[in-house]
Image (cartoon, helix red, strand yellow):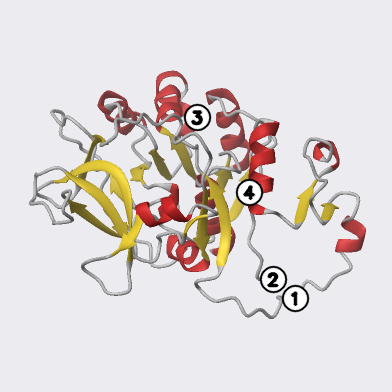
Amino acid sequence: AGGAYVPLDAAYPVERLTFMLEDVKCPILLTQTHLSNQLPVDDIKQVINIESEWENISQYSSDNLLTQVTPDNLAYIIYTSGSTGTPKGTEIPHRSLIGLMFGVDYIKLDADNIWLQHSSVSWDMLTWELWPSLVCGGRCVLFPDNIPTPENLSRVIKEQGVNILFLTTALFNLIIDTMPEGLSGIKQLLFGGESVSVPHVHRALKLLPETQILHGYGPSECTAITSCYRLPKQLDENIASIPIGKPIGDRKIYLLDRNLRRVPVGVPGEVYIGGKSVARGYLNQSMLTHEKFIDNPFVDGDTLYKTGDLVRRLSDENLEFLGRIDNQVKIRG
């Protein structure tokens, strides 16, 4: 239809949800009966309960709408954790979303994929779990419980035949420690978002020989996944860290010094991300947008996102994450 969506996780504190609604000035809210009283809706022009209104909704044509949407039109707004104190609404256009699904070279996308959507709907990995499965003809299983645990994840994976999955690093470690057999049906397993435990990766490779394990990296401002490392079946026993791999698809990664000059191989530099995956900026925060989204000095007409992440390029062109320039710690991605 050409509109943009803002996913709201009902498990979030009311204060945070209220801020998000006020920030986006949302004209339409889609909700369900059991959630309809949890949000302040006084300033929303139209509240649609998809359960009580489903009979009316079903009368509309199921044909695709004619739309004038362009690649630069807004697709969705996702709110970051707000490490600066206030959640930031990141504006993602259609071109960024398309780049996540088409021309990818790190996973196999096809109609045989059965995905599990278990991340918070207000987290950017929802984008990775939901849209590729639907656009590529696969199936997306919606996780029935609020909080994923090794036990309930294993049950759903087995019952639904899930074969492609994302896990935060912490959840990946927990499952490998407690119920690794629950992942035996997974063909492609992506994990990331936090510092990696090399011993857990070694153990996972031994316990899941039929699974392609991938380590991903990417900020919300660049549409979920920016780089990915396909773990080999035989990993060097003396490896000190797991790389974050190479840029996927149309993503571009630059490692620069404080003067925006490229650093040599092996020298730490700040990650700047370019290409079509980069967001338009932050909603209602022009000064911060100007600070974090800059003109690409290497490509005319392109924008770079300044991540604040410190990375070095290895001799094989893979990237190694070293930490944050500002010493931030990421919790659950």
Locate residue 280, reporting x and y percent: 46, 62
Residue at figure coordinates x 13%, y 28% from the top left: 238
| Left/right of residue 301 with respect to residue 29 in the rendered view | left
Give the mark toward the camera: 4 or 2: 4
Which label belongs to residue 63?
Answer: 1
- When asked about the image quadrant of residue 156, the answer is top right
Mark 2 surroundings within 10 Å by alpha-carbon count, few (fewer than 14), some (14 through 19), many (20 or more): few
Cα separation, mark 1 vs mark 4, equals 33 Å
Do residues under tags 4 and 3 come within 8 Å of each other at their CB atoms?
no
Q: Which residue is mark 3?
A: 182
Do residues under tags 4 and 2 come within 8 Å of each other at their CB atoms?
no
Query: In terms of sequence position, does the residue under pointer 3 or pointer 1 come before the other?
Result: 1
Which label belongs to residue 23?
Answer: 4
* Relative height, residue 224 to residue 166 (above, below): below
Cα separation, mark 2 vs mark 1, equals 12 Å
Give the mark toward the camera: 2 or 3: 2
